[in-house]
Amino acid sequence: MSAYVWLLIAAVVLPASYFAWSLIAVDRTSSRLIRSRLQAVGEGPVNDVATGPSLLTRIARRFTPNSYALRLDQILAKAGRPASMPLERLLTLKPLAALGGGLLVLVLGGARPGAGLFLALVLAGVAYFLPDLLVYNNGIKRQATIEKDLPNVLDQLLISVEAGLGFEAAVARVGANGSGPLAEELVRTLQDIQAGRSRREAYRALADRSTVPDLRSFVGAVIQADIQGLAIARILKPQAEQMRIKRKLRAEEKAMKLPVAVIFPLILFIFPPLFIIILGPAIINAIATFAGK
């Protein structure tokens, strides 16, 4: 093969290798957590020589619109900011994936330049936005898990507060003993408060990181109770009862939708084999009878 072909193959293999490395590499979690907390309390970005952005990251950030970068940051926040895919790595990965996908089509479909160029552009666009879709899908699953765990967490908070603990101590206990994205969000809220953020700002940030309406309603009630000086137990009890009722209604709604969801698999995959088994012998006998005449 010529040097040009080897160059195209390298242009495909190198982005794929970088993508695999970005999935399995381990970040410096503690330093990144400290920088994010300092940014949250208004200290601004913290960069040093050891953790500064790479050349590819700076180039990708330079050619990415700020509005689009902010949108990606919001999607990552809804997905819990996975350690293997921070914003800088996502911005660097997207153009490399698009370049690799386009060059792969050009290498495989070089016999037809016109169609190959069109397919290369299409695949480059798909590869560019594919990381966004994956992160967005993870965010949707994470928010669904938060909505599912919220009633149980509110019950645990209510029991802890009625047992004599303060609200933040109850939140710390539930976050330490619990598991899942909601417990992680509670722990992060307490870390924001310990980093110097006010309680109301930390609670509002918790609501902003989620798309669950019930969690936003609960956070709004807690903030209102903090402003008016109300006892938190008087707020938690109706909130917990309301969440249990909503969970029961959601379960009943899913049960009512189940027959409608079963219709399409029933028509497409169950009825045709059933008709073949029942009517097949009769049709064969009828064909044989008419053929004998």
Image (spheres, rainbow, N blue to C red):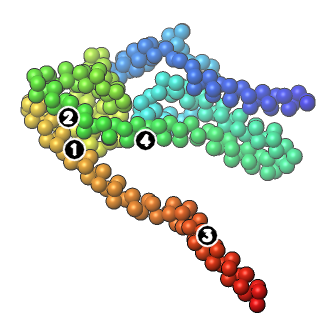
With respect to residue 7, does 115 lie above or below?
below
Which residue lies under the disc numbered 1? 244
Q: Which residue is mark 2?
A: 155
| Callout 4 touching callout 2 (CB < 8 Å) | no
Q: Residue at x 69, y 44 (%)?
A: 123
**Residue 180 image offset from top left, x and y in percent:** 36, 30
Type of residue at label 2? Asp
Q: Are marks 3 and 2 in contact (CB under 8 Å)?
A: no
Q: Residues within 10 Å of mark 4 (few under 14, many from 20)?
A: some
Q: Cα distance, mark 4 to mark 2?
A: 24 Å
Q: What separation in Å lies between label 3 and label 2 (alpha carbons)?
A: 54 Å
Mark number for residue 140? 4
Tell me the residue at 53%/41% (across/down).
Answer: 133
Q: Is residue 203 left or right of residue 161?
A: right
User: Label 4 amino acid?
Assistant: Ile
Q: Quadrant of the C terminus?
A: bottom right
**Is residue 228 shown to the viewer in this render?**
no
Of the numbered discs 1 and 2, the one sitting upstream in the chain is: 2
Q: Earlier in the sequence, mark 3 or mark 1?
A: 1
Residue hosting label 3: 276
Q: Residue at the top extreme? A: 49
Q: CA distance from mark 1 to mark 2?
A: 9 Å
Choose mark 4 or mark 2, whichever is in front. 2
